[in-house]
Image (tube, grey):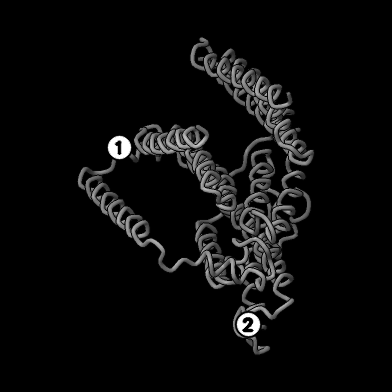
Amino acid sequence: MNALLWTLLDLLLAAMLLGLGWAAVATRDLKRGVALFIAFGLLLALAWARLRAPDLALAEAAIGAGLAGALLLAALRDEPRHEKLAAAHSRAGLWTLNLLSVLLAVVVAWALLCALEMGEGLRLAGAVTDHIGQSGVSNPVTAVLLNFRAYDTLLELAVILSAVLGVLALGPARRGYGLPGPVLGGLIRWLVPLLIVTAGYLLWVGAHAPGGAFQAGATLAAAAVLLRLGGVDRAGLPAAAVSRWLLAAGLLVFLGVGLSLAGLGYGFLQYPAGLAGGLILVIESAATLSIAVALALAYVGGWSRSGSTQPDSTQGGSH
Amino acid sequence: MIDFIAIVLIVTGIGFFAVGSIGLLRLPDLHSRLHALTKADNLGLGLVTLGTALLAGSLATAIKLLLIWLLVLAASAASANLIARHALERGDER
């Protein structure tokens, strides 16, 4: 009876995901599409939770639904003329897109089928569980991201950095929002400190439970989004000179640790026994700040005009 | 006994959610719809939270659930206020 209920719930969840995904793409009204996309992201987080992947659920809710939603809404505000763009696509272009999407769907379905038919082949989860004692952390996701496959995470940070460099190259940020009313202002004053504390908690707890640098960075960035919505043009980011260093800090510290270890003879990102936990925390702390600054800058859309656009500007300080 | 109380609370909470959703679909203008949605859903979520907190089995989890409810309360009250104010300023009352 219980298992049947769960199956029904899962089927309902899957059906709603498909429905919301279709509706988000099919609607002509971009604003409605974004709202549906955010709802889709929240339900997807629920689906990850059902698959017992709470780390992914947290990341999906914070980044996939929350920050991506905020970014899309900000983009709509900046470029209202884009709403007409959908109608301007040529028929041939649309057919090419459809064809490519179908091809992609076939490839994904084939990959899934292969994975399902593989049976008891080589699975890495067992290897992770066997070696987690040596990783310096007890959360298997963090162990993989920051130890066993630290290389991948290092490159992910580089990808985020280069994406934000692209955003920055587009010029200064648009004008921010007006001052909020008393209700929103009050909410922001309450939520921002709470979000900062939560980010610190997520960073710390990542060592032994779901959490980590990406979730913590996204939570910090959410505080920045709230501040920007509340009329703080620079979204609480420090002056450009400091922000630039923070933006690069994750990659620099990660590389620095890796190269130092290589120089000491341990090999690139091969943590010595006993030091792994501490080194992972150092890297994750720097990565949290970098991810937060990167996401906040992407939301603001560049260096804010009212703040300093030059590294040596004297306009810094209070917002 | 605790299980029974929890189930009654959760079912009552779901009832409030249902009424709020019906209100969202049926009520004539934006302000009444907001009224139905935020008031009924907040109370519904409170009852569901209370019920799940009873079933949680540990005080720490119960406190976390309570904290979530308070955060949702604050967020939904603020967003209802924002939507209503925006509609009032634009004169768009549908």
Mark 2 falls on what kind of element? Answer: helix
Question: Any mark on residue A87, and which?
Answer: 1
Residue at 74% in and 54% down? A200
B93 or B53, nearer to the observer: B53
Instruction: Tell me if mark 2 has few (under 14), some (14-19) or many (20+) residues whose alpha carbon lies within 10 angstroms of its own.
Output: some
B34 or B43, nearer to the observer: B43
- Residue A285 sits above or below residue A54 on the image: below
Note whether residue A197 is visible.
yes
Report whether mark 1 lies on the same chain as mark 2.
yes
Where the N terminus of chain B falls, by quadrant? top right
Q: Chain of mark 2?
A: A
Q: Position of residue A156 (x, y in %)?
A: 53, 65
The mark lying in front, picked from 1 and 2, is 2
**Which image quarter: residue A118?**
bottom left
Q: What amino acid does circle 1 point to?
A: Ala
A257 or A55, nearer to the observer: A55
Q: What amino acid does circle 2 point to?
A: Leu
Q: Position of residue A287 (x, y in %)?
A: 65, 64
Residue at 66% in and 60% down? A288
